[in-house]
């Protein structure tokens, strides 16, 4: 029996079709959830995304920024699936304006610290900040970064905000504040407790936790974006962040749960 070989052009077309289908298949698996994250989560999100992927096979792509800026991007149609804010006000506002599938949920409670890479003692930090020893103080922009807002609350409570205002270096986000302090641009910074874990083994950090009664509770909230095309997987990630395994990881980075 004589076998008929496919025509050369037919074979070429067949190879092209298979190649396209394979590339589409690989591309679909490579895509993941686009998760807009507050800048203070940049360290812990690496651990969370690995654990989540191990449990579900779903990949996430974190996009970091100041919570206020991310909220604005969502209003302008940014293709995010989930939003993890550093507070509840931005998620609540988005929910009220119809950008969220369900009410915001608190996934963690943040902690504010004062810190330096210089050997400083922060027992009386309010006196230290007004002294000649400290030239530059890094704080996140309070209008868009919740950690900057609570830092200002603490400084107002101590009655020194206006006294030290000329020394303040404003970061667009807490990530920029962390860069200022770890690179020596600023002498002192107000930032997230998570930084201590982030720089462990890399940078010596002298720090003190600011008493939580001196600022509004940092309730970090999340929402599923209504325009998400990955609603089912977004819901899985949303539920994962409220689960015991995720809370263990968050706690390791200094977050209350």
Image: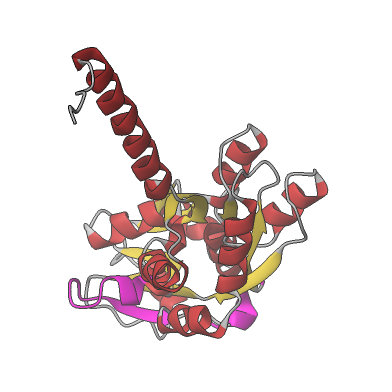
Q: Is residue 33 magenta?
A: no
Q: Is residue 214 above or below residue 77?
A: below
Determine which quarter of the picture holds residue 3: top left
Residue at the far top: name it.
9
Q: Is residue 158 visible?
A: no
User: How are the colours assigned in the image?
Assistant: secondary structure
Image coordinates for residue 130, horizontal then vertical, percent: 41, 66
Q: Nearer the viewer, residue 235 or 79?
A: 235
Q: Is residue 213 above or below residue 188?
A: below
Query: What range of the chain is rendered magenta?
Result: 195-216
Q: Is residue 253 left or right of residue 89?
A: left
Q: Residue at x 45, y 62 (%)?
A: 40
Identify the residue shown where x is 25% and y is 62%. 182
Q: Is residue 5 left or right of residue 89?
A: left
Q: Is residue 219 left or right of residue 10?
A: right
In the rendered image, residue 196 lying in the magenta stretch gets the answer: yes
Q: Foreground: 231 or 202?
A: 231
At 43% from the left edge and 44% from the top edge, which residue is drawn?
28
Quarter of the image that includes the C terminus:
bottom right
Where in the figure is residue 248, as x and y percent of width and height?
A: 47, 85
Work out whether 168 lies above or below 220: above
- Quadrant where the N terminus lies? top left
x, y percentage for residue 58? 45, 60
Give how far across and how far down residue 233 sits, in percent.
Answer: 57, 58
Judged left or right of residue 149, residue 56 is left
Q: Is residue 68 visible?
A: yes
């Amino acid at each position: 029996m004589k076998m008929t070989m496919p025509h050369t052009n037919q074979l070429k077309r067949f190879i092209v079709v298979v190649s396209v289908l394979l590339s589409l298949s690989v591309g679909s698996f490579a895509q993941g959830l686009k998760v807009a994250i507050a800048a203070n989560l940049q360290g812990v999100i690496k651990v969370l995304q690995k654990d989540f992927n191990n449990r579900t096979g779903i990949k996430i792509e974190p996009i970091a920024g100041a919570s206020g800026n991310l909220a604005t991007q969502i209003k302008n149609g940014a293709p995010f699936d989930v939003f993890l804010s550093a507070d509840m006000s931005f998620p609540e506002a988005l929910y009220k304006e119809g950008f969220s599938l369900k009410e915001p949920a608190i996934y963690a409670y943040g902690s504010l610290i004062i810190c330096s890479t210089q050997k400083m003692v922060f027992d009386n930090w309010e006196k230290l900040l007004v002294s000649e020893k400290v030239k530059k103080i890094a704080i996140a922009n309070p209008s868009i970064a919740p950690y900057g807002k609570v830092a200002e609350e603490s400084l107002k409570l101590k009655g020194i905000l206006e006294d030290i205002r000329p020394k303040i270096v404003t970061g667009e986000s807490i990530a920029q504040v962390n860069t200022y302090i770890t690179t020596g641009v600023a002498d002192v910074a107000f930032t997230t407790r998570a930084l201590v874990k982030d720089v462990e083994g890399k940078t010596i950090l002298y720090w003190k936790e600011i008493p939580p009664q001196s600022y509004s509770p940092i309730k970090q909230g999340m929402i599923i974006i209504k325009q998400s095309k990955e609603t089912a997987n977004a819901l899985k990630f949303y539920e994962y962040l409220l689960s015991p395994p995720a809370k263990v990881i968050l706690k390791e980075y200094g977050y209350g749960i």
